[in-house]
Image: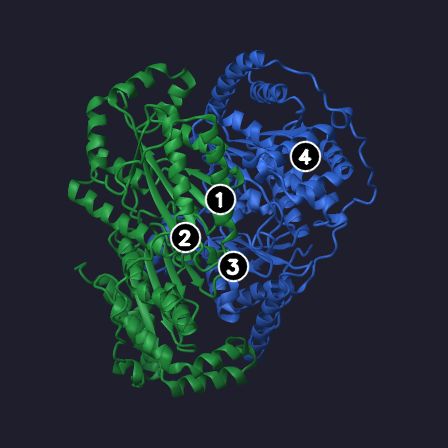
Chain colours: A green, B blue
């Protein structure tokens, strides 16, 4: 979408409004009726602008014209950026499912403007954040969430006139939030900042109430009706990665039990100490991926053993629930990311997109090929806020997996760990190996590198995992 | 469940553990496999206790014995009660769905103890809160969530020995939270407080690690396997309420447009001002119920017109989504309640339990008859924290409904408001009227009274709604 200026709107007459209302309601129900189709979409409307430019009034008017039961409005006060977190964190849970329309009144741009006005960031940082936000919205769009952005604008003179006319209770309320709108310097400053994110926004002049409401409603209608162009993702030149030796033939070097015990206890304590130090600065996310029976569960147990359950959270990721399928695939991970002070461990993760979803065909070829870049950006949005991302691929040999499968089958209290599906996945060994190789090649980044750990020998693996965490937590900290 | 003392546990042998693990995993899967059945349950485990009594270790051990993918652990720091909110608010979103087991490490009892230790409340208030919490848990149980409560206990001497042995990083972490566990007076004090909620808790001695872990795991196993007794709800003496005249023959007194306009604008401003004042003290919840076309949407529009969308949130309640059906019926409302400063408006509400669910048979007779008391308690948990609950039943006559249905059908942009279902509901007019009468009689309480508003004349209705809100917001405030 590249419209720099709002299009012309016919003048407001009674007849126009009736047609508009009908069109809006029909478009809403159309969107909703398609929510389970492959090209289903949600619509996310970001609203920002000058105070008293009529954002609230336009939303209130919109609610009268549409079917209000199919419109979500989430209004949040600017998040003062006191803790490191990706810009989407406070809002992710409110983004629309497919079939829904959500107006986010208060959003990441508002937070950014607030930070800029408080001199917390300079122009370069501001522009860098805008670039990240656009990528994020681009990735949302590619995964079924149409994003439109509306800036409600009024002149300095108009703003002052409206402030004069405010009644007292509204004035008090007004006073609690935002900037000093009586200060012309501040007004000019905010206008200068927002010029920097001008081009993919719709600017709605707020002077004339009828025109403003009509323009806003027409924008929503347009977003409801227009299917986005297929995104030109440069994914046609696909080339499989070579499968590295560490995946084909995981090392089988052995560690004796005594030497393991001695090492392990020391390392566990060291890692616990490092984690406790780290989370005071920024959250930690640890991801475990690997073939079935590669030792994900056991590795997690050893990692958390010296910690208190109040210090971490573990998410075991299974197939998405029906309501989760109505969101972009990253949504159920965005909404589970830790806050400052937290450690979150994923037993399987968003990499399912390029592993199981690729191999089982739950994602289309276009979708999973595109996902590598999307995931890199998603992780970058966290690491650039200081999040530590530690990713493990547990590499088991085909033979050792068979041994463990049989042991699971023969041990009553372990039988729950092995299902028909695990045997079926085993048949697809080569496919999963290729998927892992591609994943490792394409998503190992400076700030979020993959650690490949051979797990045929459990003792060696556990020690190496702890060592890798310790290393990643101390790198660049000395 | 009325076990005051933990039962005897066989001594820990290798064989025991294997059996226990198998039994736990089987019980977990059994619970999960029944999640869509009528008597499905979730299990909620509340864990509290003396620091270093081994709560964390027991949970970590439990995770090793069970299928960890079917166990949720949510650990939260005590919520210092700085804002008025019902005790369940920070935790409601983490309570288990049917088929799930959730350990809440950090829960309403922890918050209450923290408040007591900080001298924020006296013994009488403490006991009153305990009573509310037990009712709440009783209602959870009646609606499919088994609740068990475990207190991990160690002696003062044992606590001091363990503190001596803590390594430095754990010590630092420990130091951040909770009380000064080196202070014997505080230890005695907390023990005295917790004696007050002793009787329906399982006390697990934390001195012996093996015994502790086994006891905890056996408690969970027991909770997983034991179907709760059918609750002896005294609902057999049911007597329909008489249908009051204001439902049978809603007043049709008319207000002229001019007088309406003059009144309305003034009232809207007054109400907006009162709401803004009120939400500084505690949140406001406004509920609109009524027959189809009784004017719920229009009333909400007039109420919010002078407000900014950042000041309120509107929830239009439709049939629950599949994942919502896996929770007690109040869950999707608990998780939508406003925080301090917020106004939440419900277009239909939890009263669906005794209206549509009763009439359409989605709730059993036992369930909806029980629901009146459950709802009264639910509302009391909010109002005793200062929440203002304003409830409207919009009373339309059968004839006027027909007029509006026809108008909706004949107006293209209003046609979405009328469906086959609305016509079917109209056939059940008398049933809904009876349900409304019973609801008004049984759930109109001092702190959360119903306002019955005749809506055949829209102008009169809108003015009366605003007047009722203004009145409820000023009562007792003069």
Residue A95 makes an appearance in the image: no
10 Å crowding of disc 2: few (<14), some (14-19), many (20+): some
Which residue: 33% across, 57% down? A230
> In front: A229, or B62?
A229
Where is residue B73 shown, x and y percent of the image?
Answer: 49, 58
> In front: B276, or A470?
B276
Question: Seen in the image, is A350 located left or right of residue B124?
Answer: left
Label 1: which secondary element: helix
Position of the C terminus of chain B, as image quadrant, is top right
10 Å crowding of disc 3: few (<14), some (14-19), many (20+): few
Disc 1 and disc 4: Cα gap in Å?
A: 24 Å
Mark 4, chain letter? B
Mark with earlier residue (1, 2): 1
Label 3: which secondary element: loop
Q: Nearer the viewer, mark 4 or mark 2?
A: 4
Disc 4 target residue: B291
Identify the image quadrant of residue B5: bottom right
Question: Does label 2 lie on the same chain as label 4?
Answer: no
Disc 2 target residue: A335
């Amino acid at each position: 979408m590249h419209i720099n200026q709002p299009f012309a709107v016919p003048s407001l007459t009674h007849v126009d409004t009736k047609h508009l209302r009908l069109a809006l309601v029909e478009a809403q129900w159309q969107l909703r009726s398609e929510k389970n189709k492959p090209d289903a979409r949600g619509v996310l409307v970001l609203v920002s602008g000058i105070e008293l430019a009529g954002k609230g009034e336009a939303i209130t008017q919109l609610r009268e014209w549409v079917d209000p039961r199919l419109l979500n409005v989430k209004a949040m006060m600017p998040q003062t950026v006191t803790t490191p977190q990706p810009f989407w964190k406070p809002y992710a849970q409110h983004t629309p499912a497919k079939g829904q329309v959500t107006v986010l009144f208060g959003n990441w741009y508002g937070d950014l403007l607030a930070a800029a006005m408080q001199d917390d960031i300079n122009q370069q940082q501001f522009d860098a954040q805008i670039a990240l936000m656009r990528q994020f919205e681009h990735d949302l769009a590619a995964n079924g969430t149409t994003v439109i952005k509306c800036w409600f604008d009024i002149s300095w003179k108009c703003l002052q006139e409206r402030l004069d006319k405010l009644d007292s209770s509204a004035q008090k309320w007004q006073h609690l939030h935002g900037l000093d709108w009586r200060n012309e310097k501040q007004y000019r400053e905010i206008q200068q900042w927002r010029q920097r994110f001008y081009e993919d926004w719709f600017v709605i002049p707020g002077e004339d109430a009828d025109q403003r409401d009509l323009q806003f409603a027409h924008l929503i209608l347009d977003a409801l009706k227009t299917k986005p162009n297929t995104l030109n993702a440069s994914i046609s030149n696909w080339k499989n990665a070579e499968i590295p030796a560490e995946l084909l033939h995981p090392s089988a070097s052995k560690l004796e039990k005594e030497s393991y015990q001695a090492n392990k206890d020391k390392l566990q304590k060291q890692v616990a100490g490092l984690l406790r130090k780290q989370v005071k600065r920024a959250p930690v996310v640890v991801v475990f991926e690997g073939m079935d029976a590669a030792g994900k569960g056991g590795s997690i147990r050893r990692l958390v053993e010296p910690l208190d359950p109040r210090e971490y959270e573990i998410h075991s990721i299974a197939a998405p629930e029906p309501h989760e399928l109505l969101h972009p695939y990253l949504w159920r991970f965005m909404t589970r990311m830790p806050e400052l002070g937290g450690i979150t461990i994923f037993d399987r993760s968003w990499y399912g997109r390029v592993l199981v979803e690729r191999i089982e065909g739950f994602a289309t070829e276009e979708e999973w090929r595109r996902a590598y870049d999307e995931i890199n950006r998603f992780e970058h949005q966290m690491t650039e806020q200081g999040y530590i991302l530690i990713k493990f691929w547990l590499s088991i040999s085909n033979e050792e997996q068979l041994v463990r499968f049989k042991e699971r089958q023969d041990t009553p209290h372990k039988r729950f760990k092995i299902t028909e599906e695990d045997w079926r996945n085993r048949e697809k060994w080569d496919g999963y190996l290729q998927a892992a190789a591609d994943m490792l090649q394409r998503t190992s980044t400076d700030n979020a590198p993959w650690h490949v750990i051979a797990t045929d020998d459990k003792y060696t693996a556990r020690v190496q995992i702890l060592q890798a965490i310790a290393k990643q937590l101390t790198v660049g900290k000395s």
